[in-house]
Image (cartoon, helix red, strand yellow):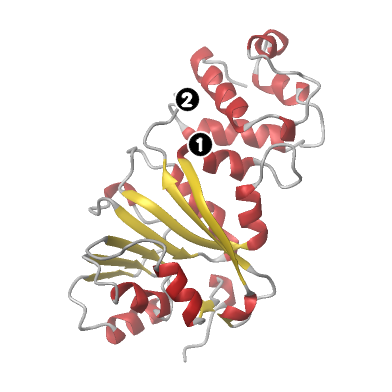
Amino acid sequence: MLKLKKSLGQNFLIDKNIIKKITSLDDLTNQMVLEIGPGSGNLTESIIEKKVKKIVLIEKDQRFSNLLAEKLEKEKNMEIHNKDILKYNLNSSLLSNAIIFGNLPYNISTQILVKFINLKKWPPFFKKIIFMFQKEVADRILAKPNTKGYGRIAILANFRLDIVKNFTISRNCFFPKPSVDSKIIVFKPKLKVDYKIADIKNLEKITNIFFSSKRKMINKPFSKIFKDYQSVAKNLKMNLHSRPSELSNNDYYKLTEYYEKTNLRY
């Protein structure tokens, strides 16, 4: 067994029942699949057993890329890319209607999710994302307005993705055993997005300003973004005495849409 690198967040799923549960979340027969961080290939082998049309693996650790190439050398419909997913050009993907799997490193999981949300072409090349997160991160993605965990990642995720399923996975299902539990979240891309936001980076910018002072009233971030912030708030029917967590996802989409339309810069 190769020595695992803590810096890459290498905790591999070893529970066969959970692996089977994950690969049964969709009918994978004749499907195109992209897997991020396959590691030793436990999930990969289960996916291949489902007779997929093609599987593309993106593995940052050269040692595991080599291991997978050797272990799965007979697989003709497989590609292995020894790449960092955060530097990988997803916009050039030749896959279509793909299903994405990923047991994501805890320290960069939200960055990976945002990378998929930020794709230039939408509807995207995938039809479903099945990602595993640290439970605390997953709970933030699932959080609703007016709850403790609600914030930027929930707003960003819900802009272009629908969350269709989630379930918890015990830390005992991994090797080495992490200090926290994990959670699977299944996403589907929204084929039609209700708000016309030209650049999602503006949504990231707006939410960053608001949630950097999440306990304070929203009049302060409003004044940072808009010159005539009181009239903007009135126009958008937002109470300046509210706190960032009291606004809905749609409120932030409306804010960003208005920000882009008025060409106001802070």
> Marks 2 and 1: CB-CB under 8 Å?
yes
Left/right placement of residue 246 relative to residue 22 reads right
* Residue at the extreme bottom of the image, as rendered: 1
Q: Amino acid at mark 2?
A: Tyr
Q: Residue at x 47, y 43 (%)?
A: 161
Residue ID for mark 1:
159
Quarter of the image for the C terminus: give it: top right
Left/right placement of residue 210 relative to residue 188 reads right
Q: Secondary structure at mark 2?
A: loop
Q: Position of residue 61 (x, y in %)?
A: 43, 75
Above or below: residue 28 compared with residue 230: below
Q: Earlier in the sequence, mark 2 or mark 1?
A: 1
Q: Residue at x 51, y 81 (%)?
A: 15
**Count of numbered circles in the view:** 2
Q: CA distance from mark 2 to mark 1?
A: 9 Å
Q: Sort mark 2 into few (<14), some (14-19) or many (20+) by Cα contacts within 10 Å.
A: few
Q: Position of residue 20 (x, y in %)?
A: 43, 75
Q: Sort mark 1 into few (<14), some (14-19) or many (20+) by Cα contacts within 10 Å.
A: many
Left/right placement of residue 156 relative to residue 120 reads right
Residue 12 — which label? Answer: none
Q: Position of residue 222 (x, y in %)?
A: 70, 21
Q: Position of residue 189 (x, y in %)?
A: 41, 43
Q: Nearer the viewer, residue 74 or 17?
A: 17
Based on the displayed image, in which of its 4 quarters is residue 64 positioned? bottom left
Residue 195 — which label? Answer: 2
Q: Amino acid at mark 1?
A: Phe
Based on the displayed image, in which of its 4 quarters is residue 124 positioned? top left
